[in-house]
Amino acid sequence: MDDGSKKSLPRGIRNHNPGNIKLGTAWDGLSDEQDDDVFCQFKTPVWGIRALMKILLTYRFTHKITTIEKIINRWAPPIENDTDNYIKYVCAATSKAKDEELANSIEDYLPIVNAIIRMENGQNDYTNDIIVEGMYLAWEGYPTNEKEKEKHS
């Protein structure tokens, strides 16, 4: 890909940071060069997706945030975003109610990650295989089924 076509891609895609995660955390998989003044740049999309999912897992296990409404209110606060529209978009994309409790599962989180990527970038060119790879890297060290979840609650 030449520089011209790369520049036409959304910033999050160019940065391999499809969640548009801001600078400030020493994430695994960050690019050696960070020339974006606001957002992290990752070596590959898998690392950016991993960071996105790590944040969602922190919401779940540290802050007990387990609904789309609460996730998006924290992810895209009203001070910076049209949060109500973002919530409606994710709910429509996932066929879930905004206050529906989410299971700690690929079935519940994959559509949310896909929706966040589309909302943040206006597109999602990643295959589910790439997204799932990043998600599973994030899940390392976290419980991934309901029995284990209960032990950590």
Image (cartoon, rainbow, N blue to C red):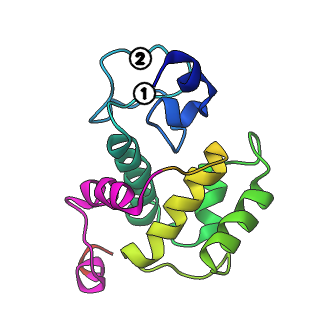
| Magenta-tinted stretch | 126-150
Q: Residue at x 65, y 66 (%)?
A: 90
Q: Dot 2 surroundings within 10 Å: few (below 14), some, or many (20 or more)?
A: some
Q: For mark 1, what is the residue?
A: 41
Q: Nearer the viewer, residue 143 or 62?
A: 143
Q: Residue drawn at (40%, 55%), measured in percent from left and top?
A: 53
Measured from the top left, where is residue 121 in percent x and y? 62, 43
Contact (Cβ within 8 Å) of mark 1 with mark 2 = yes
Kindly identify the amino acid type of the residue bearing the numbered disc 2.
Answer: Gln
The answer to if 94 sits in the magenta stretch is no
Q: Secondary structure at mark 1?
A: loop
In this view, 108 is above or below 50: below
> Which x, y percent locates residue 127?
42, 57
- Image coords of residue 129 (percent x, y): 34, 61
Count the marks: how many?
Answer: 2
Residue matched to label 2 = 34
